Image (tube, grey):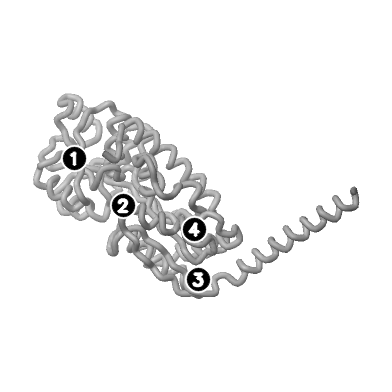
């Protein structure tokens, strides 16, 4: 009986070793055919633009075409669900912004995918802060004055966003929570319509992405009084961070990340991550991200997973505190 046990353990160890060797060999030959990169948003947006530049640079590193496929819908949930159900072989990858992974799951009671269990994080590509912009007629020159104005007129100031549950919306709710001010949220279908009303004075302020807010700030049509990152922006070095304006712990915005379906072999995940970190050095990609006010990140799958889980917990608390729902 003891001999049988030893033979069983030996056979199991041999099987595991064979599986590890097979997986390693698979990673060595990967990729042997084109890769599909799913972007869960429409063509032309900042996520799509960045994803396509990453695909171009990464394709050169891996020696195979990377085909970008846009699967928009439900705020990114359609594309995320498609990748979650794809074969875990490294040939279908997800290039997602933060929303469908760290915010949407807390707003909707049920999603067709699990943001944590359905994916393998590969690499954090970039982080993108927001600008806090106000209409020129609003007589505030800094965040402290904005807080004082909001407290003097509770429920009278309005802030716009590019959609309920968006980064702009939650940044506003986060601001309200940390400062104790009472402001009215006005959601729009996109950043453009919100900015039109902000410039026209129909709303008072907004947290918005660089790519759409920066031209209006530079053109003198809006005032930027803070940035939501932990460091100042090279594009606007004179604009302080929210933390420098004494709103402790305030850091908000969005991020872009590369993920694979859960179960994708670790050697393949590690190989993609290594090549992505090199691909992030591409000049065109870095310059495009800079124009969006984004910072290139990179790092290991483990670092991205830790960051992702922290973001998931953070925005879950904010969604719950603000009472944001899908209704």
Residue furthest out toward the front? 1
Residue on which disc 2 sits: 74
The answer to whether 288 appears left or right of 158 in the picture is: right
Asked if residue 112 shows in the view, the reply is yes
Residue at horizontal 54%, vertical 71%? Answer: 31
Q: Say which label, 1 or 4, has the lower sequence index.
A: 1
| Neighbours of disc 1 within 10 Å: few (<14), some (14-19), many (20+) | some
Instruction: Tell me if I can see residue 288 in this picture.
Output: no
Q: Distance between the residues labelled 2 and 3?
A: 33 Å
In this view, the mark in front (2 or 3): 2
Choose the circle earlier in sequence order: 2 or 3.
3
Label 2: element kind: helix
Q: Which residue is drawn at 26% across and 43% down?
A: 164
Q: In this rendering, would 9 be left or right of 152?
A: right
Say which mark, if any, is on residue 61.
Answer: 3
Q: Name the residue tied to disc 1.
A: 186
Q: Measuring from the top left, give residue 304's x and y in whole percent.
A: 50, 50
How many residues crowd around disc 4 within 10 Å: few (fewer than 14), some, or many (20 or more)? Answer: many
- Would you call the spot at circle 2 few (<14 residues within 10 Å), some (14-19), or many (20 or more)? few
């Amino acid at each position: 009986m003891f001999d049988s046990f030893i033979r069983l353990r030996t056979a199991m160890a041999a099987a595991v070793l064979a599986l590890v060797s097979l997986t390693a060999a698979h990673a060595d030959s990967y990729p042997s055919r084109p890769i599909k990169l799913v972007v869960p948003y429409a063509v032309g947006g900042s996520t799509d633009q960045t994803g396509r530049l990453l695909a171009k640079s990464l394709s050169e590193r891996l020696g195979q075409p990377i085909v970008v496929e846009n699967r928009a819908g439900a705020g990114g949930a359609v594309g995320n669900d498609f990748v979650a159900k794809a074969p875990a072989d490294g040939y279908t990858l997800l290039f997602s912004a933060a929303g469908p992974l760290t915010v949407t799951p807390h707003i909707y009671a049920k999603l067709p995918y699990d943001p944590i269990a359905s994916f393998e994080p590969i690499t954090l590509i970039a982080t993108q802060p927001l600008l806090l912009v106000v209409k020129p007629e609003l007589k505030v020159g800094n965040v402290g004055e904005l807080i004082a104005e909001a407290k003097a007129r509770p429920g009278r100031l309005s802030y716009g966003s590019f959609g309920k549950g968006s980064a702009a919306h939650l940044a506003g709710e986060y601001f309200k929570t940390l400062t104790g001010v009472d402001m009215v949220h006005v959601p729009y279908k996109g950043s453009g319509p919100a900015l039109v009303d902000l410039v026209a004075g129909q709303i008072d302020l907004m947290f918005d992405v660089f790519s759409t807010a920066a031209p209006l700030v530079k053109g003198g049509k809006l005032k930027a009084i803070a940035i939501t990152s932990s460091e100042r922006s090279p594009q606007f070095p004179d604009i302080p961070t929210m933390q420098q304006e004494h709103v402790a712990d305030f850091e908000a915005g969005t991020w872009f990340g590369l993920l694979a379906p859960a179960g994708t072999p670790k050697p393949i995940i590690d190989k993609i991550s290594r090549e992505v970190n090199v691909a992030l050095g591409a000049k065109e990609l870095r310059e495009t991200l800079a124009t969006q006010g984004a910072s290139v990140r990179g790092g290991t799958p483990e670092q991205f997973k830790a960051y992702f889980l922290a973001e998931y917990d953070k925005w879950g608390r904010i969604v719950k505190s603000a009472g944001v729902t899908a209704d």
